[in-house]
Image (cartoon, rainbow, N blue to C red):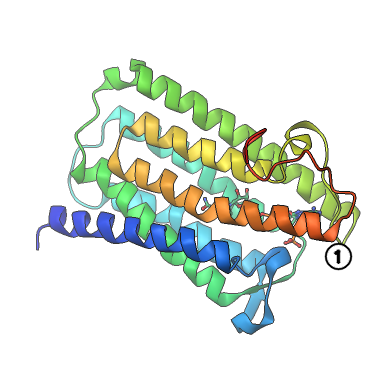
């Protein structure tokens, strides 16, 4: 079978899986962190789990890009650098900032599966499936707007994760109500930032796999934001009433 056919099937299957995940996660929150369930079997340290899930996205992107003899243009190199800005942090820095606690191996394997599939779709798009981006793409409004969204989302996500890490370090073993900045408006600014970030990727690459990745990110994080929000309201009777789950002022 030609790679184009394999790729098309992978896009369809991955998108269908994203729809199922979106529905399933509203009923069964991904069992890690505050939603951890012992019934999900053997657990590893969360640092190991995050490293196992995320490092392949950083490494395999390079493999999928350079596998073959195709020409890699300047725009693809820019996309590679943007990708690595996220995944080098997420794979090799983020896990070591976590306070160690168990994470079911099953969760890590699901994340690993997602990252292998997604990295294949993104990497092969630039390598062989998609059109070659001319250098002038870097001046195209779609690239500029998408990049601005990516940087904004990246900044919100890192800031929001830092607030939570500080709270965790200061109150080991417990949870507190986060506050300040976007936390005054929504329960999960880290997820809000991540969704903006990968929506920016979809816009700046103007590609089918970019759109599928943005959809998957929302499919993963909308239900989790909803579960977190309900958990906060259940756990803290004084949780701010006006605070929304994920989208300021809306939801
Ligand atoms: N692209 C995607 O599909 C995708 C999917 C999942 C995650 N992510 C990203 O990965 C990052 C981590 O996600 P996550 O689901 O682990 O986030 P999370 O549930 O918000 O937890 C992040 C960290 O903050 C701690 N924490 C959260 N709320 C706290 C509170 N109120 N008080 C004290 N500590 C608190 C957590 O401790 P505990 O571990 O003890 O709960 C954990 O160490 C986020 O930036 C997210 O956007 C991306």
The residue lying at 70 percent from left, 41 percent from top is 244
Q: Quadrant of the C terminus?
A: top right
Furthest residue toward left: 1
Q: Position of residue 205 (x, y in %)?
A: 34, 33
Residue 153 higher or lower than 234, as above or below: above
The residue lying at 74 percent from left, 69 percent from top is 101
User: Is the residue marked 1 within 8 Å of ligand 1, measured from its CB?
Assistant: no
Q: Position of residue 48 (x, y in %)?
A: 62, 68
- Left or right? Give the position of 137 relative to 218: left
Task: Write down the residue under mark 1.
Answer: 173
- Left or right? Give the position of 69 relative to 90: left
Q: Position of residue 28 (x, y in %)?
A: 58, 69
Question: Ligand 1 shows up in which quadrant of the image?
Answer: bottom right
- Left or right? Give the position of 113 relative to 151: left
Q: Is residue 228 visible?
A: yes
Q: Residues within 10 Å of mark 1 (few under 14, many from 20)?
A: few
- Left or right? Give the position of 27 relative to 189: left
Q: Of residues 108 and 215, which is closer to you in this image?
A: 215
């Amino acid at each position: 079978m030609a790679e184009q056919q394999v790729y098309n099937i992978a896009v369809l299957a991955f998108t269908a899986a994203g729809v199922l995940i979106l529905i399933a996660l509203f009923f069964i929150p991904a069992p890690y962190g505050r939603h951890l369930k012992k019934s999900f079997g053997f657990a590893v340290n969360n640092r190991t789990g995050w490293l196992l899930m995320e490092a392949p996205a950083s490494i395999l992107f390079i493999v999928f890009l350079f596998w073959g003899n195709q020409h890699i243009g300047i725009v693809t190199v820019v996309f590679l650098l943007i990708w690595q800005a996220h995944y080098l942090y997420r794979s090799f820095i983020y896990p070591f900032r976590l306070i160690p606690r168990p994470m079911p191996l099953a969760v890590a394997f699901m994340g690993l599966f997602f990252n292998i599939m997604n990295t294949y779709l993104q990497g092969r798009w630039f390598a062989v499936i998609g059109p070659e981006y001319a250098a002038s793409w870097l001046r195209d409004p779609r690239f500029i707007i998408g990049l601005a969204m990516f940087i904004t989302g990246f900044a919100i996500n890192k800031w929001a994760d830092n607030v939570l890490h500080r709270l965790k370090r200061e109150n080991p073993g417990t949870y507190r109500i986060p506050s300040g900045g976007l936390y005054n408006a929504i329960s999960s600014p880290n997820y809000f930032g991540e969704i903006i970030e990968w929506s920016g990727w979809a816009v700046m690459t103007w590609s089918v796999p970019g759109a599928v990745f943005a959809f998957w990110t929302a499919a993963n994080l909308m239900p989790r934001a909803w579960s977190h929000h309900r958990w906060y309201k259940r756990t803290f009777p004084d949780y701010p009433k006006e605070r929304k789950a994920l989208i300021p002022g809306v939801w």
